[in-house]
Amino acid sequence: MIRSVAHLQSLAWQRAHLARHKRSWIIMGVVVVIALFVGAFGYFGPVAWFALTNAVLHTTYRLAVAYGIALVLGVAIALVVGWSPFADALFPVFDILQNVPSFALIPFFIYFLGYTDMMIILFAVSSVIWPILFAVLTAIKNAHSDLNDAATIFGARGLRRIPYYLAPLSFPAILTGSIVGIAIGWESVIGAEIITSITGFGAFIKDASATGITHVAIAGMLVILVIVFVINRLIWAPLLAESGKRYSE
């Protein structure tokens, strides 16, 4: 009986997930059709698509590198701190650091790193890392005591506790933290490009807006929208679905 109820709940969850998946594809399809329809009348004719593509690729590259660095650092710090006796003391410290306005720090990044790719990447890391770090710390802190006891009984002690217990426990939190972090990362990278005028999507739309060419900025935003949608549908949605089936209690 219990097994059948759980099976029905799983089926219901999968149907709801598929329904959301289909709706999102329909919405994006409508957006693409409208964009193609508008473009057919020459609205996007003056857009320099090669320059736009190059700018978007620069921004996407910086965000990908920043996310990779933030993921490694955020998860490593959370896993080490999360099971240490200093976790409760360090949590407020991390909270204070997280609430420092990120764009207030950009002059320091420019001063030490100049107007470079590395400056934008590390600036984005300073924003992306916090959702990942706090999601993993919260997952470890809120873990059921019986799971901790079971891990200890089955030999997950010392450093073995990290790969065999804490890492699998934190996988759903890593996904949710990553999704939030990536969203913040887009803002950080594009904002830094706008401020510094370094080649990228931010500088591209800044130049387009300065010259009053609104259709160029709209075309750029549509390209970013498509990229974000594809990443969410092809990467995050399947990972969240797998996480929900494998790690749900």
Image: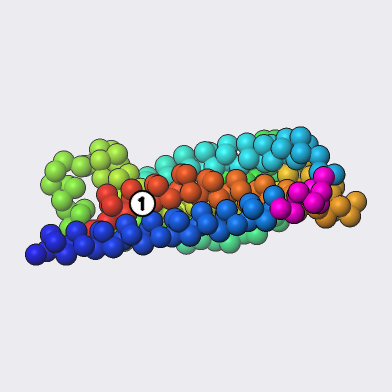
Q: Position of residue 80 (x, y in %)?
A: 37, 45
Q: Position of residue 232 (x, y in %)?
A: 50, 49
Type of colouring: rainbow
- Quarter of the N terminus within the rendering: bottom left
Residue at x-position 21% and y-position 42%: 157
Q: Position of residue 188 (x, y in %)?
A: 66, 51
Label 1: element kind: helix
Task: Give the residue furthest to the right.
Answer: 211
* Residue 130 seen in render: no
Task: Give the residue furthest to the left.
Answer: 1
Residue 115 in the magenta stretch? The answer is no
**Frontmost residue, 174 versus 163:** 174
Task: Please tell me whether residue 224 is drawn above or below residue 5 in the rendered image.
Answer: above
Q: Tell me if 243 is positioned left or right of 101 in this view.
A: left
Range covered by the magenta-colored residues:
37-45
Residue 42 in the magenta stretch? The answer is yes
**Frontmost residue, 233 versus 73:** 233
Residue 58: quarter of image: top right
Q: Tell me if 88 is positioned left or right of 109 in this view.
A: left
Residue at x-position 29% and y-position 39%: 163
Give neighbour class at mark 1: few <14, some 14-19, many 20+ (Cα, 10 Å). some
Q: Could you tell me how many numbered marks the image carries? A: 1
Q: Amino acid at mark 1?
A: Ala
Q: Which residue is mark 1?
A: 241
Residue at x-position 89% and y-position 55%: 212
- Quarter of the C terminus within the rendering: bottom left
**Frontmost residue, 46 versus 131:** 46
* Residue 43 seen in render: yes
Q: Position of residue 26 (x, y in %)?
A: 52, 57
Q: Tell me if 169 is positioned left or right of 58 in this view.
A: left
Residue 97: quarter of image: bottom right
